Image (cartoon, coloured by chain):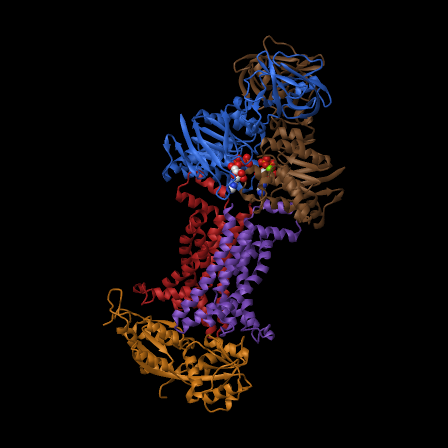
Chain colours: A orange, B brown, C purple, D red, E blue
């Protein structure tokens, strides 16, 4: 087995969880409860899984369901639990030239944008959000190509800024959007949410515990057979789905934005 | 015609209080060659930099061609009319040719004329073969020649030279001193130069200024300076080796009697100084040596007996250190005399000193 | 392949132009500051040196705030364009170029500077001669400037937006590849960047060292 | 407030230590390369100059790959620690420090170098004397090195992971604040960074200029 | 005792083919003072650097104290036994005191001894007052003194001096030449020095080496070099101003008859050269001037009639340029003779040349 004395866990996580501030709350609570120390590396979901494939992490917190499935199929993950979600939002210019606010689903909204050739900023970086966007385009069967479709390979916050500058639509996680418009005093976003809350904008977050057998130790080092701190990773995954934690998650953000930033699965 | 007038000059290096340069008045005339001489650290370089407008004085006016130098344009015009060769060669990281041409280029002379003048000057200073070499990889004397070429090629109205001949070999130094500079002066160029080589100054200067500790102590012709140094410092600096304390003890046929010791007395034909205690200066070149029996020369009135202590041959003459009953004298004689009189250490001789060659300074 | 070529071109164009502007401003500025004696000069030099430590991210942030729509220069609509990247990179390169020009100028023998004045050079001629004399250090200054901006990612990312085919440069490309987990592509782009940097530097170094060996 | 203080301390510790290591290696290296004449010296200099343009992101990537668990140095378990950050920043600062030391050394009058040899200095004494003589340029080199690493974000982010309370430094803090939309906090951290940079540089510049004014 | 031996030395600056230094053999003995003289660019500095192991020769062996210098340790030991003063002062950006102390510090002398020796040396060179000044902000001559102090304070076994007196003032120069260096030699220190000042060389050197274009053309005592230059180049370089083409046209009482022109003939008492076409060297100091009527001196056998063209006074003597029916001669006479004989330009005189002073070189 893995060494119980190893009190450090490397968590590769999507930036949105860290940027929303939830991660700090969770890791602090976890540490208090179990004594484990979490080293949280906030990268995109894409990089997070790439790092994990190389064995650089013990546990993942990601939101890219398709890739997660592949990841599991390849045997990199020992267990996966989708434990919370929130919604992506489609944001766009306040005058909503493509009329997305009149649509009933994200798919429809994307189709309108493509049809009107309204500017759209894509994150183009294999992040969870980008994967979601790609999936949505696939559903609409409209091909996102042309001058209106701008691929900015930057983080979510900056993508929002670019969208604001270029009077463009974009797909964002809600937390980042709220953060950027709330403290936007200086660079107030010239954007509003044009589509929200529809089922196909659901954004599922999963925790994946790495499979230690995939990462046998090559160099002899004391006490551990695998790189992966399985015990710790498992403890964190268990912690996340424990009732107390779930309560914490469901309350998070309510005081600041009047609504929670994340919802529990099945609720 | 007065080219340059300096008035009430005052300067000191900001960080230090122990050196002040102070020149109440200095004038420079067309065609003149002024030698600025003085001990190390006297302020010669500093003064030269100030009067060539490369160092701003704390106080003082500088007039060029009758007009006071005030505006930027005046300064530029002055720099374009003058040339300055610093004590330490400072060359650009370019070819020798380009280094010499640079002043002309600055003056927007046509390339053809530049190349002609530069070539001529390089030949004159015998550095034609270096034209295309990088100026940072030549020998010390070659570098000095390039510095001189750079200045001379400009045909300046005033030439400032700070130790310009230091590492030149004898033939080139001679040709510059005997030909190049006199020709320049002939065409009206005024020269102010600093050198520690007394032969050079003597041959070149029409006027001397002795600077000691930031002050001009004496100025005049070679004859005045070397024959009549104004103070003990000047006398020591110019190498009047015989500076002997003495006392005026009486008169003798219009002449004063000087006692150098109980047994040694000189006659002196100059004016009587204020005090009786004096310093007696005897230029080494005014001492004549005779072998026994003393053969009295007409113009040498004072005769002493002595012994040669040391014979120090030099290129064109020989130094003799002589002991005359406890008074030590240095004389300079020709190689010929040494040979003919068979002068050597230990030999007893007569020393003849012309009364008119002796100079007295009050002992203070 | 074609895309890499485009990225390389963007990198070279943006950083090249920035370097030229930084040189045109920074070299004369460095000469002036290096040679003149005026009140507050030490502070100015400290400021320039501090500029070398100017965090590109901060430069990016400020440029974004100035050139964003709500910023004072927003009406130009230049954010997320190459122009904005050039502006940011110029700001980053300028202190480096200036600081090393100052250092180079201060190394010139004061006697040579006096000599240049005494030769009757006008201000412009003076500058030309002194810059030419300090050319080797200035070359190093430019190399340092080029190195710093061609390899800089924070600011170009923020002000350029890493828009594919438009403002993606080598560094933002590397970052993006990394983020996408495409480490190999990141390494390839890194290799290209290093190769460019090495070729430029080798050329400049050969020129530079050729001249100093004379010494 | 307390957090900002911690971040500042981390920044100073990491960059300070990196600078010290880069100095200890880079200064003697620069002196050797600057003074010796050997085959391939020009290439080495070009390489060092290229190093100045080493993209921090690339350095970060390589360090991640070397020190990651699957990398050859993985057994040390040092990734996402300050040690890793120090390693990355040392790699970034080293070429800068070396290159400017070389430039500074090459400026020393060859006559003075000959003089030092002729005085009978052992190799070690020689180094000490020459380094002392080039101290002003070396100071600039260190300033440039410090400036480049204290303000660098790409590499520290990748190898340090921006772990709160542990590997968050000023620059990654700025980036994080920006990402979280907290522009004010980003500007505050940026201000702190600039202030540190300015104070360090002012102090060094005052020392430096004090000495050169003598000249 | 031989301190240093150089064999088969060969050197050239890599980038250039036009200068090669080549010294087949050179030996230096304890207490000797060797003057290396030669025109600018002859290679004196280069040679000095090579024999002080500061420049690696292309070929050649260097033996110190009988052993060949090979290892790093040998080189270090050599450097610690010698001292080198370069042509251009090069000081560290430190205080004057520290600049002088540095060699002693390198030798790990105790601080007390260092401070004592440094203080003494600063006083000896009259720069005690500069001790705490930064060495980069002192005057040229002061810098030179610091350089000398740095070398002399080491009590070296061999001292290499490259133009060490160039910008020193007369009194300090004299005290170094007449006191400091002779004392050093007395204690066994060998000195190799370069200077363009012939007075200095003459007074200081026990042996001369004339280097021209990278080759040692002549070596010997002052008497041999200046009295018997080996070639036209040497003669020109050392300032034998009268170098006149002549022809041997006959014999006269064991003496050769030299014809300088149709009307001017000399007698010459030396050996007959291989060719009849010769160069006739007449040292200026061997010419005696007499006013009319010609008063034949015993030792001056050749008398010419001439006119003074130019009188060039110098510090201790006077140059006369004389025209003798188309043959131009330069003579050096004392100020006293000028005064006593009333010599001035235009005056007709007799020129007396000692037959033994003339030297012939084959004209090639
Ligand atoms: N660093 C260098 N690189 C190339 N050539 C050089 C270098 N230094 C000197 N030379 C050349 O080598 C020759 C000898 O130079 P060196 O300095 O030894 O002359 P020198 O006899 O000392 O002359 P001077 O009396 O002018 O000091 C000259 O032709 C000079 O131009
Ligand atoms: N840059 C400087 N800063 C401070 N003091 C200086 C500086 N240069 C020279 N001095 C001092 O000023 C005084 C005059 O120096 P200056 O160079 O004018 O002397 P100098 O007469 O030219 O001497 P030398 O014959 O040695 O060349 C000296 O005491 C010197 O130490
Ligand atoms: Mg001077
Ligand atoms: Mg020389």
- Looking at the picture, does residue A29 appear above or below residue B320? below
**Residue found farthest to the top:** B293
* A253 and B87: which is toward the camera: B87
| Side (left or right) of B34 relative to D194 | right
Place of residue B51 in the rendered image (x, y in percent of width and height, measured from the top left): 67, 41
Seen in the picture, residue D91 relative to A206 is either above or below; the reply is above
Q: Between residues E364 and E61, which one lies in front from this camera angle?
A: E364
Q: Residue furthest left?
A: A1
Viewer-proximal residue among A166 and B219:
A166
Quarter that holds the N terminus of chain C: bottom left
Residue at horizontal 69%, vertical 13%? E294
Residue E129 appears in the picture as rendered? no
Point out residue C66 in the picture as x, y percentages from the top left corner.
Answer: 57, 71
Percent across and percent down for residue A160 are 49, 78
Q: Is residue C110 above or below residue C75?
A: above
How far across and down, in percent of the image, does residue D1 sit?
Answer: 45, 68
Mark yes or no: residue D82 visible.
Answer: yes
Q: Quadrant of residue E296?
A: top right
């Amino acid at each position: 087995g893995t060494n119980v004395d190893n009190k450090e866990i490397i968590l590769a996580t999507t930036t949105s969880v860290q940027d929303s501030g939830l991660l700090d709350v969770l890791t602090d609570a976890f540490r208090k409860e179990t004594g484990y120390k979490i080293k949280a590396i906030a990268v995109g979901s894409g990089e997070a899984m790439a790092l994990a494939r190389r064995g650089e992490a013990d546990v993942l917190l990601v939101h890219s369901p398709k890739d997660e499935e592949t990841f599991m199929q390849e045997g990199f993950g020992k267990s996966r639990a989708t434990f919370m979600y929130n919604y992506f939002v489609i944001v766009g210019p306040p005058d909503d030239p493509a009329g997305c606010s009149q649509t009933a689903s994200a798919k429809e909204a994307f189709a309108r944008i493509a049809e009107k050739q309204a500017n759209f900023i894509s994150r183009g970086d294999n992040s969870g959000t980008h994967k979601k966007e790609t999936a949505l385009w696939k559903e609409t069967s409209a091909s996102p190509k042309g001058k209106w479709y701008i691929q900015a390979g930057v983080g979510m916050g900056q993508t929002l800024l670019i969208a604001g500058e270029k009077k463009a639509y974009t797909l964002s996680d809600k937390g980042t959007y709220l953060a950027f418009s709330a403290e936007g005093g200086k660079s107030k976003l010239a954007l509003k949410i044009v589509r929200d809350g529809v089922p196909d904008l659901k954004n599922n977050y999963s925790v994946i515990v790495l499979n230690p057998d995939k990462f046998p130790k090559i160099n002899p080092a004391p006490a551990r057979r695998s790189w992966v701190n399985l015990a710790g990773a498992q403890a964190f995954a268990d912690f996340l789905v424990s009732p107390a934690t779930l309560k914490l998650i469901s309350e998070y953000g309510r005081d600041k934005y009047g609504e929670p930033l994340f919802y529990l699965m099945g609720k | 015609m007065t080219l340059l007038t300096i008035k009430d000059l005052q300067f000191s290096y900001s960080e230090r209080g122990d050196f002040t340069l102070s020149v109440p008045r200095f004038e420079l005339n067309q065609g003149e060659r002024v030698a600025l001489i003085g001990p190390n650290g006297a302020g010669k370089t500093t003064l030269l930099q100030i009067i060539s407008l490369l160092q701003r004085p704390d106080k003082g006016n500088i007039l060029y061609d009758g007009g006071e130098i005030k505006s930027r344009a005046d300064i530029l015009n002055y720099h374009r009319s003058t040339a300055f060769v610093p004590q330490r060669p400072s060359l650009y990281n370019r070819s020798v040719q380009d280094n010499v041409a640079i002043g002309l280029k600055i003056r927007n002379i046509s390339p053809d004329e530049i190349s002609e003048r530069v070539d001529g000057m390089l030949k004159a200073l015998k550095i034609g073969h270096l034209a295309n070499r990088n100026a940072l990889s030549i020998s010390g004397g070659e570098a000095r020649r390039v510095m001189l070429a750079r200045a001379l090629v400009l045909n300046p109205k005033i030439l400032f030279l700070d130790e310009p001949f230091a590492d030149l070999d004898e033939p080139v130094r001679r040709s510059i001193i005997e030909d190049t500079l006199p020709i320049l002066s002939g065409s009206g160029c005024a020269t102010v130069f600093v050198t520690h080589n007394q032969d050079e100054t003597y041959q070149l200067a029409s006027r001397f200024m002795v600077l000691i500790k930031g002050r001009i102590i004496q100025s005049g012709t070679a004859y005045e300076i070397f024959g009549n140094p104004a103070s003990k410092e000047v006398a020591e600096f110019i190498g009047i080796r015989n500076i002997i304390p003495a006392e005026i003890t009486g008169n003798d046929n219009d002449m004063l009697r000087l006692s150098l010791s109980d047994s040694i007395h000189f006659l002196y034909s100059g004016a009587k100084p204020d005090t009786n205690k004096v310093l007696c200066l005897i230029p080494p070149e005014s001492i004549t040596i005779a072998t026994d029996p003393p053969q009295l020369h007409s113009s040498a009135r004072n005769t002493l007996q002595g012994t040669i202590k040391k014979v120090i041959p030099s290129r064109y003459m020989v130094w003799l250190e002589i002991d005359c009953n406890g008074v030590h004298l240095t004389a300079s004689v020709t190689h010929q005399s040494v040979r003919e009189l068979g002068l050597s250490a230990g030999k007893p001789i007569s020393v003849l000193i012309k009364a008119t060659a002796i100079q007295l300074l009050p002992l203070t | 392949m074609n895309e890499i070529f485009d990225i390389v071109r963007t990198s070279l164009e943006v950083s090249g132009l920035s370097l030229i502007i930084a040189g045109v401003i920074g070299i004369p500025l460095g000469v002036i500051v290096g040679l003149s004696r005026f009140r507050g000069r030490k502070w100015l030099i400290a400021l320039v040196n501090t500029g070398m430590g100017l965090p590109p991210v901060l430069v990016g942030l400020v440029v974004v705030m100035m050139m964003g729509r709500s910023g004072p220069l927003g009406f130009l609509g230049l954010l997320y364009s190459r122009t904005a990247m050039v502006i940011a990179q110029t700001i980053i390169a300028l202190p480096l170029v200036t600081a090393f020009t100052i250092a180079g100028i201060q190394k010139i023998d004061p006697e040579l500077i006096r000599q240049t004045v005494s030769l009757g050079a006008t201000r412009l001629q003076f500058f030309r001669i002194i810059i030419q004399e300090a050319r080797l250090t200035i070359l190093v200054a430019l190399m340092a400037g080029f190195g710093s901006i061609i390899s800089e990612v924070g600011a170009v990312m923020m002000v350029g937006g890493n828009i594919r085919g438009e403002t993606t440069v080598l560094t933002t490309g590397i970052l993006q590849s990394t983020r996408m987990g495409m480490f190999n592509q990141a390494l390839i782009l890194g290799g290209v960047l290093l190769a460019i940097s090495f070729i430029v530097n080798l050329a400049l170094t050969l020129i530079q060292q050729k001249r100093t060996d004379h010494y």
